[in-house]
Image: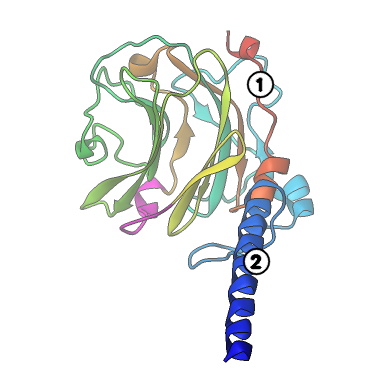
Amino acid sequence: MDLLKTGIDSIFVLSVIGFFVFLILLYVHYNVTSIFPFIPNGYTLPPADSMITSQTRSMNSEEKVAPEINGSALTFDKITNFKYENFTISFDVYFNGEYRNSSSPRVILYFANNPLTPISLPEDSTLVSSSANLYNTNFIVYGDPVVNDLNIAVVTGSTITRVLELAETIKNVPIKKPFKITLIVGKTFIEVYKDKKLVKTYRYQGVLDTASATGTKLYSPITNIVGDTIKIGNVQYFDSVIRSDQVRVATNEIKSDSFFK
C-alpha cells in the first residue's frame, strides 16, 4: 500500500512539473521563439526566415516621410499574385484623440474596387451588405466613432449573404502615440497582434468571403469619415501567413509620433 501511495504521489508531482514546463514553453513560443509547429487546417506552412527577407516581404511605406494619404490605394509592386487569404499585413496606427462623426465607424483599412467617400456608414451588419458600402472587402479595420477602440472584423459568407464577424476589439488604444497592428489572415482564422505581441486568435464562424475581394485593392482610411482622427503608415504586406516569432523579427519597428504629425 505504501509503495502504491508513493507511486501515485510521484506521478502527481511529475504531472504538476510537466504542466508548468508546458506553460513555460507556451510563453517562450509566443513571446520569444517558435517551438510548436502549429499548422491548423487552412493555415499554409509559414515561409523560412530567409524567404521572408528576400521574396515574400514587400514594404509599402517604410521609407516614406509621411503616413498614408487617406483614401489612397496601397501598392505592393513586388507582389505578382496578391492574395486575399493566407496573407499578413502590418502597419502603424495613430489616434489623435479627436472625432469627426458620432455615429459612423472610422474605417481605416479595407479592400475595394475604388476608394470609398461616404459621409456616413452604418454601425451594424449592413456595413458590408450594401453595394454602397464595403461590399468587396473580406476584412475591415475600423475605429469606434467616439471611443478610442480599434476593431478588427472579417466578412464571411458570399456575395448573396455576407456576415460581419468582429474578431477583436482593442480597447483604449494610445492617444498621440503610434502602435503597431499585425494581422495574419488565414483561410479559417485571423491572428491579431499589437506591438508584435499576440492579442487574439479568432476562428471564423463562416467561410471567409475571398471571392468578393479578389481583384480589388487595399485602401487606406476613408477620407470623409476618418479625416485626421486616425492615421496609418509604415505598411507591410507578406504574401503568406507568418509565425509569431517572424512577426517580432520581420515586421518594421514602430515609427515615432513625429512621423504622424
- Rendered position, 54 above or below 224: below
Residue at 41%, 29% (x, y): give it.
171
- Rendered position, 13 above or below 111: below
Secondary structure of residue under mark 1: loop
Instruction: Determine crowd level at label 1: few under 14, some 14-19, many 20+ residues with C-alpha closer than 10 A.
Output: many
- Rendered position, 124 above or below 155: above
| x then y, percent, for residue 159 | 26, 51
Asked if disc 1 and disc 2 are in contact, CB closer than 8 Å, the reply is no
Q: Which residues are magenta?
A: 202-213
Q: Nearer the viewer, residue 125 or 192?
A: 192
Q: Nearer the viewer, residue 104 or 192?
A: 192
Q: Quadrant of the N terminus?
A: bottom right
Which residue position holds label 2? 17
Secondary structure of residue under mark 2: helix
Which residue position holds label 1? 255
| x then y, percent, for residue 7 | 62, 85
Which amino acid is tagged 2?
Answer: Ile
- Sequence order check: which comes first, mark 1 or mark 2? 2
Q: Nearer the viewer, residue 106 or 136?
A: 106
Magenta stretch holds residue 209: yes
Magenta stretch holds residue 229: no
Could you tell me if residue 120 is visible in this image?
A: yes
Q: Nearer the viewer, residue 57 or 142?
A: 142
| x then y, percent, for residue 185 | 49, 49
